[in-house]
Image (cartoon, grey):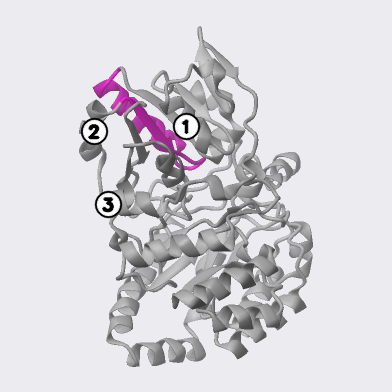
């Protein structure tokens, strides 16, 4: 077995770890997600090491000495971080020319040939679901015997056949052991989750067909493949054993509520453990299921509303009606389930009026907190294809971040410029948070907890710094 380093590479100051991968930009409040996509193959490779440079505050010069300690380096990359990550690979290769280096992630899955040809430092890329691909490489198998990789032979790229998707998710070892071995959980924090928290995936894939969503269209597919409720409970019990200081567990599945009977059964097992937990959900969960989840420890749901415009929801194939989302949110409020709502500005069909409509909708349903992003057309998604066909991309590859890591609009429309889309994000945040009702809610929350007071004050400073940086970049 090759001595293997799994590396989430260093990036710009303030980089957001981002949903288990390398997110496109810094957010309004600095946050870090667990590098689960690297932790899973690391769990399959004995004596490997996982290093999350951004979360640990490691710069390139601090990572480079590790090159001589390993034979195989696996790095997770993304479209916006790709050029930076290639430079890290080149620097590591210069230190140790014998180091085999491979990249994984959605970007290389949909662009394998240009990715592996981007630098002589890269030996291969792992496409699609790469867990067992990396395990076989670490075992020293010849490249031509390994499904799911692309690599160079005599200056040309060879693409091996696709690797079959994993059908039995229970066969994958727990990532919690890797977290315990290699990570410091206090390094990970998110504004809407209790700190410290732990997040991991209990399944992969999403039934929804949202045109913008990256993972189902590039890596995980549209079939929701899950670990059994018993296995999920085992992982959570392991968290309680390893990290008794943890206040919340977050299930990072694209849509944990895609399988309602499983969600209910899992919730009951979690209730027996007495754990506080949260998850991603679509705004269509029936009241009965919500109540079972709430009665068994559910604290918060992360809900992708995306837009308050029904036409935009149709355009992106969200499979959701605004009135259903409104009723679902009312049910959550009634049950005392907090919601972190996510919205996107600049999706196909966006106009000045639909932006106002979405802001009105967000204020009306009033999630506890929210996140506003700019539409990003990732290669491999239907949105990217539509953007290319209709001339919506600002550049051929679609610029997503500026030099400071702030997200910019990669899309623009004949009647809505990218500048207007960019400016709408700040306006959305200000109109939602700087209103008497929301200020009162936050103040009440702070008055009842000194810990929350300190946290909200820190986040408030970061929030206004974020808005000022966007103003300076406009």
Q: Which mark is residue 341?
A: none
Q: Is residue 87 magenta?
A: yes
Kindly give the residue lying farthest to the top in the view shown: 154
Residue at mark 3: 56
Magenta range is 71-97
Quadrant position of residue 453: bottom left
Q: In whole angstroms, how far apart are the C-alphas of marks 1 and 2?
A: 19 Å
Secondary element type, mark 1: helix
Residue 305 shows up from this direction: no
CA neighbours of label 3 inside 10 A, class few (<14), some (14 to 19), many (20+): some
Residue at mark 2: 66
Secondary element type, mark 2: helix
Query: Residue 394, position in %: x, y?
Result: 61, 44
Residue at mark 1: 134
Q: In whole angstroms, how far apart are the C-alphas of marks 3 and 1?
A: 24 Å
Q: In whole angstroms, how far apart are the C-alphas of marks 2 and 3?
A: 15 Å
CA neighbours of label 1 inside 10 A, class few (<14), some (14 to 19), many (20+): many
Camera-side residue: 151 or 360?
Answer: 151
Q: Is residue 220 magenta?
A: no
């Amino acid at each position: 077995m090759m001595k293997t380093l799994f590396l989430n590479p260093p990036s710009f100051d303030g980089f957001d770890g981002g949903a288990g991968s390398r997110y496109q930009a810094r957010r309004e409040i600095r946050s870090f997600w667990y590098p689960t996509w690297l932790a899973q193959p690391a769990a399959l490779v004995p004596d490997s090491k996982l290093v999350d440079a951004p979360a640990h505050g490691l710069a390139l010069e601090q990572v480079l000495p590790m090159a001589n300690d390993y034979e195989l380096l696996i790095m997770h990359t993304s479209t916006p971080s790709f050029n930076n990550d290639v430079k890290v690979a080149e620097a590591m290769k210069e230190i140790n020319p014998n180091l085999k280096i491979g990249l994984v992630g959605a970007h290389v899955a949909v662009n394998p040939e240009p990715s592996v040809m981007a630098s002589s430092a890269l030996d291969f890329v792992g496409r699609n679901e790469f867990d067992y691909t990396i395990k076989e490489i670490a075992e020293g198998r010849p490249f031509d015997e390994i499904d799911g990789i692309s690599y160079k032979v005599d200056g040309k790229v060879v693409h091996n056949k696709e690797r079959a998707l994993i059908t039995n998710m229970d066969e994958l070892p727990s990532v919690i052991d890797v977290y315990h071995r290699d990570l410091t959980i206090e390094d990970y924090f998110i504004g809407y989750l209790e700190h410290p928290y732990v997040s991991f995936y209990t399944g992969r894939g999403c039934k929804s067909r949202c045109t913008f969503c990256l993972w189902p269209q590039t890596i995980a597919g549209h079939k929701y493949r899950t670990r059994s409720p018993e296995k999920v409970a085992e992982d959570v019990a392991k968290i309680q054993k390893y990290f008794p200081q943890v206040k919340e567990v977050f299930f990072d599945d694209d849509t944990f509520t895609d399988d309602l009977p499983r969600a209910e059964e899992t919730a009951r097992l979690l209730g027996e453990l007495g754990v506080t937990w949260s998850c991603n959900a679509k705004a269509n969960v029936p009241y009965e299921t919500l109540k079972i989840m709430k009665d068994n420890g559910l604290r918060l749901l992360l809900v992708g509303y995306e837009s308050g415009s029904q036409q935009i929801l149709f355009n992106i194939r969200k499979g959701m009606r605004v009135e259903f989302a409104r009723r679902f949110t009312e049910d959550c409020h009634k049950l005392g389930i907090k919601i972190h709502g996510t919205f996107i500005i600049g999706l196909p069909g966006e106009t000045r009026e639909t932006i106002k409509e979405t802001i009105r909708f967000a204020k009306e349903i009033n999630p506890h907190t929210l996140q506003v992003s700019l539409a990003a057309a990732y290669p491999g998604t239907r949105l990217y294809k539509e953007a290319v066909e209709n001339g919506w991309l600002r550049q051929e590859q679609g610029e997503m971040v500026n030099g400071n890591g702030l997200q910019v609009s990669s899309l623009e429309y004949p009647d809505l410029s990218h500048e207007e889309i960019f400016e709408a994000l700040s306006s959305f945040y200000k109109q939602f948070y700087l209103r008497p009702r929301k200020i009162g809610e936050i103040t009440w929350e702070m008055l009842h907890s000194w810990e929350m007071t300190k946290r909200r004050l820190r986040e408030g400073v970061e929030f206004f710094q974020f808005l000022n940086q966007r103003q300076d970049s406009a």
